[in-house]
Amino acid sequence: MADEEYRRVDGRKVDELRPIKIIPSVLSRAEGSAYIEWGQNKALAAVFGPREALPQHIQNPTKALVNYVYRMATFSVPDRKSPKPGRREIEISKVSGEALEKAIFVERFPNTTIDIYVHIFDSNAGTRCAALTAASVALADAGIPMRDLVAACAVGRANGKIILDPCKDEEDASDAVDMPLAIMPRTKEVVLLQMDGLISKEDWKKAFEFGLKGCLEVYEIQKRALKHRYEALARTEQKAIKAVDKQLMDAAESLER
C-alpha cells in the first residue's frame, strides 16, 4: 500500500501532525507563558527572568544561565507517576535547556538566570517536543531576545512505516523508533536530535525530511499564536486610548461650562 493511501490508528496520513493549539500569556505572574494542546498532550510553560542568578557562585559573567525544568504531573499517565523527578525528566530538562540556549541571546544577560518551567498535565507521546514548542512561545511572550523560535516535533517508525508525530499506540509498536527533533526554522539549524531505536540510512533520510516538514508546520502555528496575542494587545491598547481621550474631552467640556 502506498504511503499516500496508508491510514494510521487515528486516521492520519504518515506525514500529518496531530491537532495543535497554542495560547500565549495564560499566567499573570510570569514574565511569559504559554499553554499547548498537541493531540491529547496538554502542557503549560512559564518563564521567569532574566533575574540575578543565586547563589552567586553559579553566576556566569559572560552569559545568562538557562534553567529548564520539565515535569510530568502524577496524573498525566494512566499509571500514577511518582512525584519525584525521574531520570527521563532530568534528561529532557537538560537537552531542552541546551536547545533553547542556542536560540536565546544569553550573552546579553551576564550573571543572570532565565528560569523556564514546563508541566505536563496529560501525556500521549511527544511531550518533550510539545513542551519545547510551548517554552519557545513563552520566551517570546516574555520579550526575551531570541535568534529565532525553536520548533520541535517527533518522527518515528511503526508497523514498518516512517511516520510524523507518533502517538502512544504507535510509539509502543514492536518495531517502533522514536526521533525527537528541534530546529531554529529560519536557518534550519538543528538544536535537538535524539533517537531511540535503529533504522536504515534510507529510512533515516525520509524520517529527517518528515521531521523538518513537521517543525516548519509547528513554526507557523507558533507564529500565528503570537501574532493573535499581539493583535489582541493592540486592540486593548486602542480601546484604552479611546477611553482616555473621551475622559479628557468630557473634562474639557465640563470646564467650559
Image (tube, grey):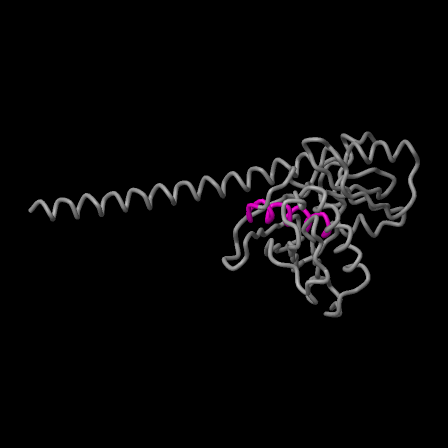
Q: Position of residue 130 (x, y in %)?
A: 68, 49
On screen, residue 161 versus residue 247, left or right, reads right
**Residue positioned most to the front:** 61
Does the magenta-highlighted stretch encompass residue 59? Answer: no
Q: Is residue 60 above or below residue 1?
A: below
Q: Position of residue 140 (x, y in %)?
A: 58, 44
Q: Position of residue 86 (x, y in %)?
A: 79, 64
Residue 17 lies in what quarter of the image?
A: top right
On screen, residue 205 versus residue 145, left or right, reads right
Q: Is residue 81 above or below residue 140?
A: below
Q: Is residue 26 above or below residue 193?
A: below
Q: Quadrant of the N terminus?
A: top right
Give whichever of 125, 2 is nearer the camera. 125
Is residue 47 at least partly visible in the picture? no
**Residue positioned most to the left:** 257
Give whichever of 257, 235 is nearer the camera. 257
Residue drawn at (60%, 40%) of the image: 222
Is residue 24 at least partly visible in the picture? yes
Q: Position of residue 61 (x, y in %)?
A: 69, 52
Total marks shown come to: 0
Residue drawn at (70%, 67%) of the image: 74
Does the magenta stretch mainly form a helix, a strand or a loop? helix
On screen, residue 34 versus residue 89, left or right, reads left
- Segment tinted magenta in the rendering: 127-143
